Image (tube, grey):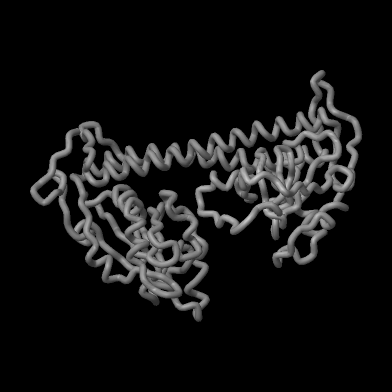
Amino acid sequence: MARSLTKDGIPTGWKYDLLDKFATRCSGHTPSKSFPEYWNGGIKWISLADSFRLDQGYVYETDKKISQVGIANSSAELHPAETVVLSRDAGIGKCGVMAEPMAVSQHFIAWKCDNSEKLNSWFLYNWLQLNKVEFERQAVGSTIKTIGLPYFKKLKIAVPPYPEQKKIAQILSTWDKAIEVTEQLLVKSQQQKKALMQQLLTGKKRLLDKNGVKFSEKWEWLRASELFKTVSRKNNSKTEELLAVTQDQGVLPRSMLERRVVMPDGSTQGYKLVVPGNFIISLRSFQGGLEYSNYRGLVSPAYTVLEPLKSICDEFFKQYYKSYDFIGHLAVAVIGIRDGKQVSYEDFSFLRLPYPSLAEQEKIAKIISVNIQEIECLQKKLETLKQEKKALMKQLLTGRRRVEIEEASECQ
């Protein structure tokens, strides 16, 4: 539907006024903890501990519950289902919709959207999400930031007719469901990857070879020094590219990093040359294990560069060095690593590493790589869905794009 505006810049047919004119605003409270009878009752109570449950639509569960006695003897209030709640302290701007009657702590603001058909709960929920950055900007405080109650008394909103609100909420709900399904698939794939790595990279589960016969050859477990040696190629060309060693993206040219990287002062003649297929021991970290390089370039002389002594499947060891099995053994071997001790080649060299046949290494690596590709595809899909929903919210919730309401139906 084409967009038309009033002389005040408000979409035609929409109303712009204080949010309090469209919904009943309520604050929260914490019953006294000096009275055990106020707690552990049957009333769900949203507190800061529930922040991770917000921004996911309905709020079904809470970390704590209060009793009817706690309600009766405090300023806490039992809000009806479909009440919209917003955090004004930790997790500022995160919101949700109560799936059943609940109470909230003083760290939240709640709006009851009654049956007067002034404001739809799900329209408000999405509008609050759209304005989350503004809420974060309004928060003040040195140690703990918060939004004061006076701000919400002056908060204004532009709302379309109720049927249009419902239709907008219904449209956005379909995107929420698509996002939720993709998130669930992503979690499942990530769990599958974890299980595969634990089973395949340690030999607990064996795969079938190219003839359909299960690999049965006993694995060798060799010392790292028998599989990898240190290399230190210096006095390299000034034209060699500088590489960055990261835990989240591996080894890559510094020019590819999105974040700002401090470039070295002076000559890089003392830097070490890295070629594709080399592994690099991460500095002051056990979380990422060892990093693999697909690139040729230079790294700081503080890094330890490793080269294989035997024929290996690079991808097998690339994944093994990210496994809980390897990282756990490395953490035990290096006392004080959590305090920032650098992992040295000596620390690494005596660790026992798996060395199955090259064919089995390649088969294991292929299975895990397929799973990783699936995870990456789901992550990209999820990010795309979120960006598309965000763009749609900006259009629908501001009236830049209007919707047909003849076929409006119940949301959620």
Quarter of the image with the C terminus in it? top left
Quarter of the image with the N terminus in it? top left
Q: Quadrant of residue 313?
A: top right
Place of residue 158 in the rendered image (x, y in percent of width and height, measured from the top left):
20, 52
Q: Residue at x 90, y 39 (%)?
A: 220
Q: Residue furthest top?
A: 211
Q: Residue furthest bottom?
A: 34
Q: Residue at x 44, y 55 (%)?
A: 54
Q: Quadrant of residue 402?
A: top left
Q: Nearer the viewer, residue 107 or 341?
A: 341
Place of residue 98 in the rendered image (x, y in percent of width and height, measured from the top left):
39, 55
Q: Is residue 79 left or right of residue 19?
A: right
Q: Nearer the viewer, residue 260 or 4?
A: 260
Q: Nearer the viewer, residue 14 or 132?
A: 132
Q: Residue at x 48, y 63 (%)?
A: 42
Place of residue 86 in the rendered image (x, y in percent of width and height, measured from the top left):
37, 60
Q: Report if residue 70 is visible in the image.
A: no
Place of residue 339 in the rendered image (x, y in percent of width and height, measured from the top left):
71, 67
- Vertical arrangement, residue 333 with respect to residue 182, above or below: below
How many marks the image carries: the answer is: 0
Q: Report if residue 17 is visible in the image.
A: yes
Q: Residue furthest left?
A: 7
Q: Is residue 317 left or right of residue 123?
A: right
Q: Is residue 116 left or right of residue 286?
A: left
- Vertical arrangement, residue 217 with respect to residue 139, above or below: above
